[in-house]
Amino acid sequence: MGETFGADAEWEENLINMAYDIDLPIEAVILNKPSKIFDVAKLKVGNTIMIDHNADDDVIVRSSDVDIFKGQLGKIENNVAISITDILLNNKGG
């Protein structure tokens, strides 16, 4: 596969199928604020971290250091959900 000159439709299809099966870690960033290591080290189970995030503030969904989506927090049944409002990769020329 892939050793012949010209287009190789079978190789391309296998590559696409393998790419779709790659695990991509994503994270939803509600707050990204600097904290002193001393304050973080004092946290214990049961402590509450106060954040300055209003219900209508955007949440960034990213993978590694790449911002992918912007969205709004919500809830579906007993699950926290994010409604995608913007695709950020297109805005960066990606």
Image: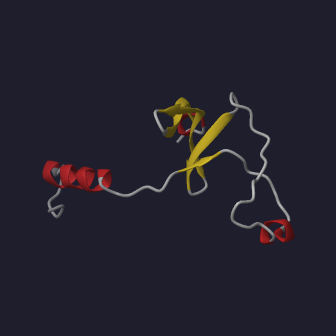
In the rendered structure, the answer to whether residue 93 lies left or right of residue 41 reads left
In the rendered structure, the answer to whether residue 54 lies left or right of residue 36 reads left
Identify which residue is drawn at 48% across, 40% down: 79
The picture places residue 35, in percent across and down from the top left corner, at: 83, 60
Q: Nearer the viewer, residue 44 or 73?
A: 44
In the rendered structure, the answer to whether residue 53 lies left or right of residue 89 reads right
In the rendered structure, the answer to whether residue 56 lies left or right of residue 73 reads right
Identify which residue is drawn at 77% across, 45% down: 51
Rendered image quadrant of residue 11: bottom left
Q: Which of 4 and 51 is in front in this view?
A: 51
Image quadrant in which the N terminus is located? bottom left
Q: In this picture, is 56 found above or below 13? A: above
Q: In this picture, is 53 found above or below 4? A: above
Q: In this picture, is 10 found above or below 82? A: below
Q: In this picture, is 40 found above or below 22? A: below
**Total numbered badges shown on the rendered structure:** 0
Colour mapping: secondary structure
The picture places residue 47, in percent across and down from the top left corner, at: 75, 59
Identify which residue is drawn at 54% across, 39% down: 89
The picture places residue 2, in percent across and down from the top left corner, at: 18, 61
Identify which residue is drawn at 13% across, 52% down: 10
Rendered image quadrant of residue 85: top right
The picture places residue 71, in percent across and down from the top left corner, at: 58, 33
